[in-house]
Amino acid sequence: MSGETRQNEEKSKDRKKLLIIIIIVLVILLVAGAIVLAFVLGKQSSQRNTDSVGDNTGGTRETVSSVRQVADEESAASVYEQMKQEVEEGMFECKMSFDWSFEDGNAESKDAYVENSTNNTHPIYFDLSLQDTGELVYSSPVLPVGTKLTNIKLDKPLPAGTYSAVCMYSLLTDEESQEVISSAGFVVNIEVKN
């Protein structure tokens, strides 16, 4: 076999490999797009309603869900752009500690902190509930962008022991209306020493 023929065969193999890689990447992008679209359409599947949730300031926070949209070939591009904007709008950076210790059930924690990063664009609040029972043990005030909460004291004192809790963040449109844009939960370890 001549050197030129061998080079042509290697080029052909390289082209086939590149084509296979491109096809795999396109399939992954299509699957990811379908998952995101299914998630957004599922999120929008409930009719528009408003639920009030109490907070520890005596006020209420309203949770608003969207109206269902169905995408067809003509509206797919606009639905995709709206979906992309909603995902970007609902994202936020979370800075916090994950191990919170308390000298006793009525003490402030010296190592618990939560910060609404300056990279965020919306205020947040969070509720802390015991993972096994769902019992709410703390509800934070609204934290504007760039603020930090330390010296956290539980709203409901806990007996000595270790607990697994869910810290559920809610991203708000603004401090006044307190409409929830999105929520995300993180597991926190709580230790009450005495």
Image (cartoon, grey):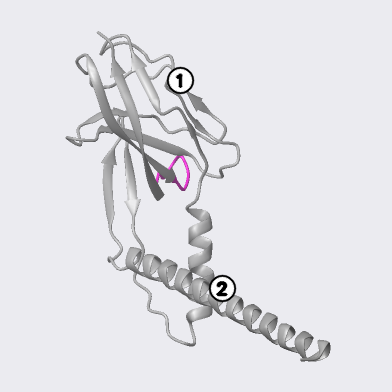
Residue position for label 2: 25
Question: In the rendered image, which quarter contains the N terminus?
Answer: bottom right
Residue position for label 1: 150
How many numbered callouts? Answer: 2
The residue shown at (39%, 45%) is 184
Q: Nearer the viewer, residue 99 or 74?
A: 99
Q: Amino acid at mark 2?
A: Val
Q: Nearer the viewer, residue 59 or 82?
A: 82
The residue shown at (38%, 74%) is 69
Q: Is residue 100 left or right of residue 2?
A: left
Can residue 179 be seen from the camera position used here?
Answer: no
The residue shown at (19%, 15%) is 159
Mark-to-mark CA distance, 1 and 2: 45 Å
Q: Amino acid at mark 1?
A: Thr
Q: Where's residue 130, x and y in %?
A: 24, 32
Question: In the rendered image, which quarter contains the C terminus?
Answer: top left
Q: Quadrant of residue 15?
A: bottom right
Q: Where's residue 185, x and y in %?
A: 36, 42
The residue shown at (35%, 31%) is 188
Q: Is residue 81 above or below residue 180?
A: below
As for residue 173 lying within the magenta part, the answer is: yes
Q: Where's residue 20, x and y in %?
A: 58, 80
Q: Is residue 188 left or right of residue 135?
A: right
Q: Nearer the viewer, residue 112 or 179?
A: 112
Task: Count neighbours of disc 1 (C-alpha within 10 A) and say few if under 14, some if 14 to 19, many if 20 or more.
Answer: some
- Determine the secondary structure under disc 1: loop
Q: Is residue 102 left or right of residue 84?
A: left
Report the span colored magenta.
172-179
Give the mark nearer the N terminus: 1 vs 2. 2
